[in-house]
Image: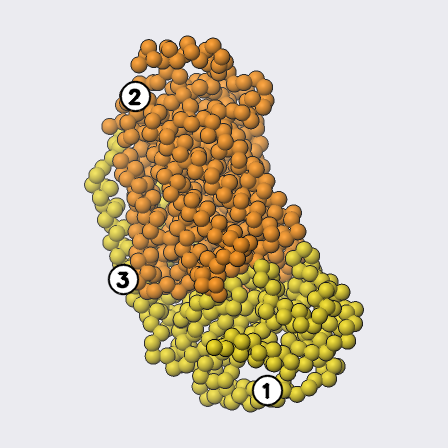
Chain colours: A orange, B yellow
Amino acid sequence: MSSDATTIDQVDSHDDHDDHNHPPSRFLDRWLFTTNHKDIGTLYLTFSLTMFLVGGAMAMVIRAELFMPGLQLVRPEFFNQMTTMHALVMIFGAVMPGWVGFANWMVPMMIGAPDMALPRMNNWSFWILPFAFLMLLSTLFMASGGPAGGWTMYPPLVLQTGTSFAFVVFAIHMMGISSIMGAINIIATILNMRAPGMNLMRMPLFVWTWLITAFLLIAVMPVLAGAVTMLLTDHFFGTSFFNAAGGGDPVMFQHIFWFFGHPEVYIMILPAFGVVSEILPTFSRKPLFGYGSMVYATCAIAFLSFIVWAHHMFTVGMPLQGELFFMYATMLISVPTGVKVFNWVSTMWQGSMTFETPMLFAIAFVILFTIGGLSGLMLAITAADFQYHDTYFVVAHFHYVLVPGSVFAMMAATYYWIPKWSGNMYSEKWGKIHFWLSAIFVNVLFFPQHYLGLAGMPRRIPDYSPQFADFNMISSIGGFAFGLTQLLFVGVIIHCIFKSKVKATDRVWEGARGLEWTLSSPPPYHSFTIPPVVDHNLVRHAE
Amino acid sequence: MKKENTVIVSLAVLAAVIAATWLLLVAPGLTGNEINMPRGVSSLSIGHYELHMAVLWICAIIGILVFSAMFISIFLHRKSRGHVAAKFSHSTTAEIIWTIIPVLILVGMAIPATTALIEMEDSSGSEMTVKITGFQWRWKYDYLDEDITIISSLDAESNAARQLDSGIDVNSVEHYLLNVDHPLVLPVGKKIKFLITADDVIHAWWVPALGWKRDAIPGFINEAWVNIDEPGTYRGQCAELCGRDHGFMPIVVIALPQDEYDVWVSQQLAGNTEQQEDAARLWTRQELMDHGKTVYETSCSSCHQLDGKGLMPAFPALAGSTIATGPIEDHINIVMNGKPGTAMVAWRNQLSDSDIASALTYTRNAFGNETGDVVQPITIADIKRQATELRTAP
């Protein structure tokens, strides 16, 4: 074993200056041709943050138009383009690449590997993303306008998009290829490159949740690719996959789409579960409660995510038996999700808690994600869903699980690991200001939308009856404030990386456990060139 | 000093939690706005409302329990209070308990949920049937037991006010965006079956007071039913994104006692004969132009604009266009059958023969399109008949 390692070192050192643990000095070598997991992770995270701001700007247009009843700013077709693009950009541009970025940075460091298993593919899977999004966003400037049929792209409506539709489909194909390659890389890394002693049931939960997420990605991204390809041929080549007049079936698209779409929502939230399961024990100074059941609950959620898709389409007119099956299966998801929440609370229970910014975001995640989960349980009740479906109640529900859910978990992860990445401490004061403003305004933004939906406001409308005016105005004010607050986040990150004078220790947090904290801050360019030996005390869930 | 800080922090957190709860849960109810699902006026809507309330309370109680445990822990088990972390890390008993209890709660919820669903999906024993067809962007109602057809569009006043920069205060418009020109009229106390479909893209028919929504899908016929308890006017909207004017295709249901409903039916039937006679005669150019202007303004102008200049890139101008000033057959064809792949819909089933003929005449002679052409309602009727014969030919 050790003689092998020496041999490899000797061979490489002839022509590979990477061995000296320094990044390449030239800009293009460092960023465009990089095969380093940390640099690619940084690229992913920068891209994700950029898309978060772009998608957020679109949300600002939406909330500005909805500030008052009547059309003041944009025409309905542009409003529809904004809602469609906001979703596509946030899902495929901000949340998914964001989690891949965290995986790139952290998975090798958490399992004791030098880098990802497939570094060149890693480079490619990132670098097709900017082109995919350039293509997607360019449709807004085309003669036929951007896609305006909703991110769910239901035919026949979406087939009324003009020629720009081809660009949308091709962009989605490229995002899918990127995601699949990222997922293959993560699976290959986790299964092959763990340090001695890091057996599966010792892996940090972030690694576990990403492993399962990666399998979900490989399973469903091709399904989406197939669905949009059929739309493409229906639009441009005269096929009738989804055209009833030609013998096709418009509802079939919805089944295919949601077979992708439901696992997709877990793709966005499972890594968040992992991050929170890292942060809560650290700041509670206590092992994660029920590590094994957390792993099994994640697997159960992943399995159930494949058999609940039609709860997104209770109103299409399914047979009673189908509706009952999907209702029961959907209700079942709340059992493993509940186990997770109870385990998190038990982790905090009897701990010795401190409340640094990552902990604050993690606690807010547990509370607000649970609110989103409970409204999800309400939506599972089919007969009641006949009222909730396609209203702002649904908008409130999925934003609660995505914004104070996924996005808060990403913010928690950023504050948690950025001292490790940069070697500098962020400003705790500004981090806390960012947290409190975010936590307050995210509720001002989304909580009133529950009321709007129950009172009868449909989603995806540019204008509304004056009876909905008050809560829309409150929601818009919350939206603007939440949006502005995120500029603070950018400021805190820039300050931490480039300006902060406070050096981070290797362990950074008093209660931190895991391999990543045994590396220096910032870590060496190649994380573990010599595999560490993992013993019980290194991992937090010591048996 | 340390202890005082803890007390101050704890009080502040407690005050914040109470304030947040009050702001989020109590204050909205005091604003006079509707914040909950309506009970509605049918057995189905009341059932769905009660189900909603039951699940809402269960969720609220679960939430309160979980969050209380968290806040107690945050209050008691903090390092600043000198709390030392315990060492426990798992408990199979606890895991089993918090797996089984939720399962039992779910079973308790599933029973009424199943009953409600079975009732909703049973449209047998209905006493009358209305076919609902969704169009971009209006609704058509065919009373299958009577010879009555209603085409229901956003009312003119809302339509004027909702244009970008209309300068009209929408608060001054009665039932802004929730009013139509021709409402759906239904009797109370009768089990009414709906057959729901669409002509172009997917829509969803939703009146909250009736308790459900159902998608209107081209090529599919969905079933749903209602038995309205109380006379009144009930408003709703399209609930599935269906293009640019998705937000502007409301639904109004007027529920009448049976005797008043019967009077309404006989009035409609009398009106039918009048309309048929009207469509069979030759119209003067002025009549066509006057009626055409009205039709154009309600049905065409949201895309092609009042001045006929369109809104490029998506909506072409009619003023001087090759269609509106070119061969009349092409013009009739595109208006009747729409243009696939664009927002131009097929108007054949949405507008009457007189409406189509008038709109054609108007657009061929307005906006400086001085073609001098006149299209008669009987011409449209002939074309429709020929198309039907072609389709049904052996």
Q: Is residue A484 left or right of residue A331?
A: right
> Marks 2 and 3: CB-CB under 8 Å?
no
**Residue A344 drawn at (x, y percent):** 33, 38
- Pointers 2 and 1 within a single chain: no
State the quadrant of the N terminus of chain B.
Answer: top left
> Marks 3 and 1: CB-CB under 8 Å?
no
Q: Residue furthest left?
A: B93
- The secondary structure type at the circle numbered 1 is helix
Residue A299 in view here: yes
Q: Nearer the viewer, residue A230 or A189?
A: A230
Q: Which residue is labeled 1 in the image? A: B276
Estimate the spatial distance between the alpha carbons at disc 2 and disc 3, rounded to whole Å.
Answer: 51 Å
- Pointers 3 and 1 within a single chain: yes
The chain letter under disc 1 is B
The image quadrant of residue B290 is: bottom right
Q: Is residue B47 left or right of residue A241?
A: left
Q: Nearer the viewer, residue B88 or A64?
A: A64
Q: Amino acid at mark 3?
A: Ile
Tell me, for residue B111, which label it has, or none: 3
Residue B187 vs B225, above or below: the answer is: below
The chain letter under disc 2 is A
Residue A372 vs B163, above or below: the answer is: above
> Marks 2 and 1: CB-CB under 8 Å?
no
Q: Amino acid at mark 2?
A: Pro
Residue A350 vs A8, above or below: the answer is: below
The image quadrant of residue B107 is: bottom left
Q: Which residue is labeled 2 in the image? A: A196
- The secondary structure type at the circle numbered 3 is helix
Residue A355 in view here: no
